[in-house]
Structures are given as structure tokens and as C-alpha cells.
Image: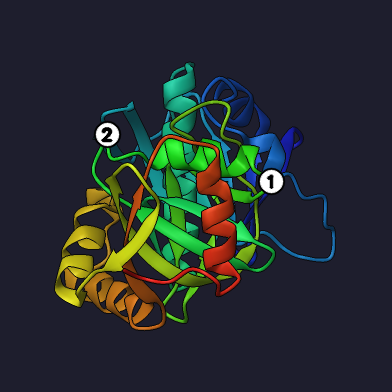
Amino acid sequence: MRDAVQLCCGTGLIRVDASLAEMSTPRVHWRSFLNGARDQAPLLTVRRHASLTGQPVEGPLGRCVIQLGEKTLDVQVEDGPFLGELVLRLAWYVVTTRLGGVLVHASGIANAQTAMIACGKSGDGKSTLSRLCRAGGLRLLSDEVVQLFPDGRAGGTPFQSDFDNVGTPGLVDARYFVALKKADLEVLEPLNGTEAAQLVLAQCFSVEELALPKVEVRRRLLAFLGRVELRTLAFRKHPEVAGFVRETLRGLGHPA
């Protein structure tokens, strides 16, 4: 490909047809993940074709046709921001699973090299928490989709729920996995392993046409949960939540 961009994905790189990246711009912060390294070969190269005989993939973002090889993802897709995002999400899914991880609908917030993964159903406050913490000086991995690995690491993605919430690349050690709950004051409460497992499995990002066996997805997620502290984070829509999360990640926050 003559016109391509190279993007960070965990510890790997994805080389993407520039037209696909550009058309995703209204919905994906891919420029924050640019990497010009020449001494590292991409794990996946995404190539766009005018026509392609392959496997149709359909979802909420639209439809495309793909052929997946060992190091290539060939796609046929129309123009449009949602379809650009669809292709990038497919690429992130392929590389993340090949690196041994999973993608989960959650927000990731980091202080230095320690992160909190906040999970919940739509409306529980992932984007609100992300916005408040980012405004308070904490690093945002993503407010929409994060990478989780069995060794307890978490990685950012360029996908977002709120356009102002810009994620960042790289892997950090996750210390907490929290379920979100709205409240009048910030507090960490206990969360049992069964509830945590049910929540993270329900929020796992999957592509039916490319999906890992469910038993393997469960193994990876349970291994991740076994490496972190499980809590419920009750919080309010207030700037002070950033300080609470910062102190928690420094080891100064305590469960109720």
C-alpha cells in the first residue's frame, strides 16, 4: 500500500489503508495512535479493495466484506465514518485476540502506569467518569473499548463514546476492575467475583464471524479478573471524582 498509516495496538502495530483511517475520523481518534516505527513489522495490514470475494460481516455500524489472512485483512467497504470505524474495530479485534487479549466495552483510566477499568451497562456513567477524570489530569485509555490481557495488563484504543474523550495507546497494569454505580459521594464497595465475571462477559466485544471459542474468552477474562482487585465504584457527577480515583490508584482509597 502506498498510502497507509501505522497505528499502535497493544504491543503491536496495525498498518491501515489511509482512506479507511481518514473516513473514520469523525468517530475514531486514530491520530492519537499513530506510530512511525520502521524497525517493527505490523502484525496486521488492512487493505481496501473495490471488489472482493470474501465473508460478509454485518453489525450495528454497517456491512463490509473481508478476507482474513495470517498477516492481512482485506476489505471491501463503502465510504462513511461508521464503516471506517467498523473496519478499524475488526482490525483491533483480530490483533488483540492474536496477542492473547480480549476487547471489552469499558472505560480505562490510568495514573502513571496503574489503571482502573470501569465497566457497566449503557447509562451507568463510563463516559462521564472518563471525562471528569481526564479533566482532572488522569490519563484516559478509552471511554468505550479497552484491551484486557490475562496477565492483568490493559490497553487503550482509539474508539470513543464521547468525542471529547480521547484515548491513548500503550499497556499499563490494571489494579482495579470496578462496576459503576451513581451515588451522592465517592466510595469503593465490595464486588464479588461472580458479579464481576457476569458483568465483564456481558460487555465483551465480539465479532461472530471471527470470534474466539467462548471457553477461551472466558478463560482470558477470568484470568484478568484474578489479577486485579474487584470493587463497585459509587460516584457522583463532580470534578472531585478525579482526585478520588487518583488516590485510589495510589493505594490511598479504601472500600466501604
- Residue 144: image quadrant is top left
Give the side of residue 56 with respect to residue 247, left or right: left
Q: Is residue 40 left or right of residue 89?
A: right
The tag on residue 204 is: none
Mark 2: which amino acid? Gly
* Total residue callouts: 2
Most foreground residue, 153 or 75: 153
Give residue 206's position: percent from left, percent from top.
28, 52
Q: Residue at x 56, y 19 (%)?
A: 26
**Is residue 233 placed above or below 237 in the rendered structure?**
below
Q: Which part of the image, by quadrant, shows the N terminus?
A: top right
The secondary element bearing badge 1 is classed as loop
Residue 115 position in % (x across, y down): 54, 64
Read off the residue under disc 2: 123
Instruction: Describe the colour scheme in one phrase.
Output: rainbow
Marks 2 and 1, how far apart at CA:
23 Å
Q: Residue at x 23, y 73 (%)?
A: 218
Instruction: Pinpoint residue 208: horizontal percent, then vertical percent.
Output: 22, 50
Other residues around mark 1 within 10 Å, as few (<14) / some (14–19) / many (≥20): few
Of circles 2 and 1, which is in front? 1
Name the residue nearer the viewer: 74 or 118. Answer: 118
- Asked if labels 1 and 2 touch by Cβ distance under 8 angstroms, the answer is no
**Viewer-side residue, 18 vs 227:** 227
What residue would you read off at disc 1?
137
| Amino acid identity at mark 1 | Gly
Which mark sits nearer the N-terminus, 2 or 1?
2
